[in-house]
């Protein structure tokens, strides 16, 4: 990927693309125009075909006759919000959206776990979605086996009994620190759920948690954020500086990922998952947190380059705030901290996080990616939806706004 200064515009086309920033003027215009968010169709009353289309795309099922009549009697955004009250929206649409985030294969065909259930609960309860990577929060069931940090029995039972996740009587929020036993300061939303730990803290060097978090929640992968201009002083000892005996390969390739990733993945230095068998990790094993003690996995293959960085603690630094990746829109302040919670706050406060959620929902509801041209209606719509999302981080609202925008096609 060629790096350099990128013209400020919005280019939001999916998980593998880099989300670029809107100009300051456009951003200001978007904030000022939130009430007119969806253009001429925003406040229009949908006809029967449009209302049915919106409901189907959000919930995956048609509306009842009564709901359809109610939808046709109000504006399109309010009508679309009615579809988010359908149980299918949570049991199918949101669950299927979140399931790939919980495994390295990014498969939707995985059992329910605490990661997925927490996403469903947060959307249902309108918990600000920017807390996804930092909250002391987990959603658990109210029947069947009790929640255990050592297995997935509760959620497997909920699956087997087709428990309705849209019901507040069936799925409730609890402090993650209380049910898991890790300190509240060490909780980091879905990153420290058992589901995430079993997939991304198992074995390895904990870089997987960082990589899959930016893939799932910033819609970028390492090849799209490579930057060989960042200093290499915090690249760990396990990374050889002459892969295959060729030092130029490190300078032109490896450094591009590790110089940014390693300083941030240091936030996970005290975490591990105690089951070393990936085949059974989804059902057995537990997240381990060792306050003040770096996990041995951070010193794997330390003889590859002994002069490299030896991890002393869980302090992290975001070196992407300078160079080409500042285009990801980092918030004022921040940039460094200790532990997973503060890193999660850093990532979720970025414009890239907001644009990732909005674009993903747009594609889900409109059945296409937004056209990336900076002058067309899709670009203006996406920018305004991002500005609206950042006001309260309601993902339900993004679904409704996307459906209203696309209700005519």
Image: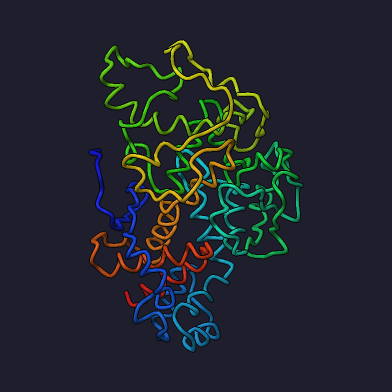
Give coordinates of residue 57: x percent, y percent: 43, 69
Residue at position x 24%, y 68% in the image:
376
Viewer-side residue, 118 vs 308: 308
166 lies above or below 62: above
Image quadrant holding the C terminus, namely bottom left
Question: Is 342 left or right of 292, judged from the image as shown?
Answer: left
How many numbered dots are placed on residues in this image? 0
Question: Is 17 left or right of 145, judged from the image as shown?
Answer: left
Image quadrant holding the N terminus, namely top left
Give coordinates of residue 239: x percent, y percent: 41, 19
Give coordinates of residue 307: x percent, y percent: 44, 13
Q: How is the image coloured?
A: rainbow
Return the residue found at the far front: 333
Residue at position x 62%, y 28% in the image:
275
Question: Is 172 left or right of 22, judged from the image as shown?
Answer: right
Viewer-side residue, 8 vs 106: 8
Give coordinates of residue 360: x percent, y percent: 41, 57
64 lies above or below 246: below
Viewer-side residue, 188 vs 123: 188
């Amino acid at each position: 990927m060629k790096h350099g200064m990128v013209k400020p515009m919005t280019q939001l086309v999916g998980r593998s693309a880099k989300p670029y920033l809107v100009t300051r003027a456009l951003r200001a215009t978007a904030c000022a125009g939130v009430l007119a968010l969806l253009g001429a169709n925003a406040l229009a009353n949908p006809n029967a075909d449009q209302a049915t289309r919106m409901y189907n795309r959000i919930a995956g099922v048609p509306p009842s006759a009564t709901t359809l009549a109610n939808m046709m009697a109000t504006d399109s955004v309010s009508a679309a919000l009615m579809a988010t009250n359908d149980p299918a929206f949570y049991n199918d649409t949101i669950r299927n959206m979140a399931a790939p985030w919980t495994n390295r294969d990014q498969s939707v065909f995985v059992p329910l776990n605490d990661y997925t259930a927490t996403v469903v609960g947060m959307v249902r309860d309108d918990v600000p979605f920017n807390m996804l990577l930092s909250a002391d929060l987990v959603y658990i069931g109210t029947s069947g086996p009790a929640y255990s940090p050592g297995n997935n029995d509760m959620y497997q039972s909920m699956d087997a009994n087709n428990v309705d996740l849209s019901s507040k009587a069936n799925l409730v929020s609890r402090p993650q620190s209380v049910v898991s036993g890790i300190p509240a300061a060490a909780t980091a939303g879905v990153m420290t759920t058992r589901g995430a730990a079993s997939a991304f803290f198992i074995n390895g060097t904990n870089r997987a948690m960082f990589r899959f978090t930016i893939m799932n929640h910033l819609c970028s992968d390492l090849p799209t954020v490579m930057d060989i201009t960042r200093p290499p002083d915090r690249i760990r000892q396990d990374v050889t500086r002459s892969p295959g005996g060729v030092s130029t390969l490190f300078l032109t390739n490896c450094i591009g990922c590790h110089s940014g990733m390693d300083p941030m993945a240091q936030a996970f230095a005290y975490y591990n998952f105690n089951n070393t068998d990936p085949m059974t990790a989804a059902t057995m094993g537990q997240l381990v947190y060792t306050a003040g003690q770096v996990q041995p996995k951070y010193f794997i293959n330390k003889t590859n380059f002994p002069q490299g960085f030896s991890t002393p603690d869980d302090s992290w630094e975001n070196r992407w705030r300078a160079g080409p990746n500042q285009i990801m829109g980092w918030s004022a302040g921040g940039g460094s901290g200790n532990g997973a919670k503060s890193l999660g706050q850093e990532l979720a406060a970025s414009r890239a996080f907001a644009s990732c959620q909005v674009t993903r929902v747009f594609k889900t509801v409109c059945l296409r990616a937004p056209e990336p041209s900076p002058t067309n209606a899709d670009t203006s719509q996406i920018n305004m939806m991002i500005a609206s999302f950042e006001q309260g981080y309601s993902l339900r609202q993004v679904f409704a706004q996307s459906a209203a925008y696309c209700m005519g096609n």
